[in-house]
Image (cartoon, rainbow, N blue to C red):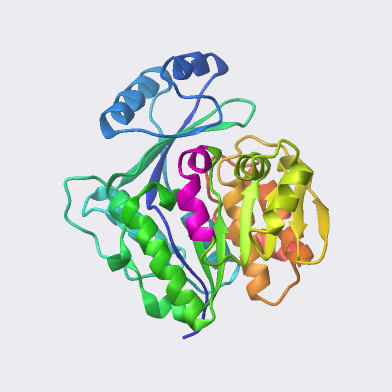
Amino acid sequence: MKLDISSLGNAIVDVQFSIEEDFVSKLEKMSIPKGSMTLIEAEEQSNLIKLLMAEYGNSKLSCGGAATNSIVAASNFGSKCHFSCRVKNDDLGIFYLEDLEKNNVLHSTKVSESDLSTGKSVIMITPDAERTMCTYLGVSNLLSSDDLDKSAIRDSQYLFLEGYLVASESALEACFEASKVAKESGTKIAISLSAEAIINAFRDQLNSLIKLGCDILFCNESEARAFSQCEDVFEAEKFLREVSSQNFITLGKEGSMIWNGNKTEIIKGFEAKSIDTNGAGDIFAGSVLHKICKGKDLKTAAKFGCYAASKQVEKFGPRLTESEYRKIKEEFS
C-alpha cells in the first residue's frame, strides 16, 4: 500500500492548563521563560503539575507531540500516514496508541516495559494565547532505530522528522537511519526545526541531520533566526535556501514565507480570534504536506496551512475534532 507520509517523533501526552499572567513570575523563578519549551525531569514536572492543580484545578489531557499533531492533521484531511514512536505499557501509553488508531494513523508500535513512563508535556496557556511547555520525554527519549518501520518509509512520498528528536542520542541515530532509507528509496524528506531551545542546545546535531538531505524545512520566525543566527527574518530566509530545497517559515497571524526553489513569497494569514497557539505550527506542517502529497503547488499548500492554523488557534489544545478537520477541508476546497 502506498503511503503519503511516514514519520517518527516523540509520543507525548499533553497536560494542559489555562493560567493567569501572574503565574508567569512563578515560572520564571523556576527558570521557565514564558513562551519557551523546556525539557525537565519527572520529579520537577510532577511538582509543577501539583502547583498548577492547586491553583487551577484539574488539567485537560490530550495526545500531543509535534510530529504526531502534524500527522493526525494530515490523516484527517485524507492523507495515508504512518507514525513510529515509543510508549510505555502504562495508561498514558495505551491512551496514545488508541488515539493514533482513532485518527486512522497506521503504526507498528508496541507498548514497552520500562522504568520510564510515557512522555508528558505540561502546556500552560496565558490569556494572550501564548503557550509555555515543560516536557518530560520519558520512554520516548529511548526511541531508536529498532522502532522504525522501514517498509513504511520506503512506501511513502515523504518522511517527516521533528527536530525535537535530536535531543536524544538514540532518536538522532534513528533519524539518520530513517533518512538513509528514504534517500535510497526516493522518499523525500521534510524536517521541522521544532523549537528555538532545541536549535540553541543541539545545533550540531540538527545540522548533521539536515545535511543528510532535506527537501522541505519547516520553522517559525524565531527558529529561522536562531538557526541562521541572523536577526532579520529575510536574511534568515536567504540562509535557509542553502540548507533545504524548499522552505516554509510561519509568521504567526501574518501568515508564512515560502521558498519554492526559485523565488520567495509571502502568504497572507487569515483572521482569527486566538486563544491558544499550541499546535499551530504542527497543523500548518501537516496541512502543507497533505496538499503537496495531493499534487498541489507550494503556494496553495501554504495557504491551506495558514487557514488550518487560523482555526487551530481558536481552540484550546493541540488538536481539532474530526468534524473540525473535515470542515476546514470543505471550506478551503
Of the 4 image quadrants, the one containing the C terminus is bottom right
Q: Is residue 278 left or right of residue 174?
A: right
Name the residue located 81 percent from the left edge and 66 percent from the top edge: 262
Residue 109 appears in which quarter of the rendering? bottom left
Find the magenta span and give its range.
Answer: 197-210
From the top left corner, tell me how far across and down residue 94 is, in percent.
Answer: 28, 56
Q: Is residue 136 left or right of residue 216?
A: left
Q: Nearer the viewer, residue 191 or 45?
A: 191
Q: Nearer the viewer, residue 184 or 129?
A: 184
From the top left corner, tell me how far across and down residue 156 is, in percent.
Answer: 51, 77
Res 27 seen here? yes
Q: Is residue 331 above or below residue 16?
A: below
From the top left corner, tell me how far across and down residue 90 is, in percent.
Answer: 22, 50
From the top left corner, tell me how far across and down residue 305 is, in percent.
Answer: 69, 57
Magenta stretch encompasses residue 199? yes
Count of numbered tags: 0
Name the residue located 39 percent from the left edge and 69 percent from the top edge: 177
Q: Is residue 307 left or right of residue 167?
A: right
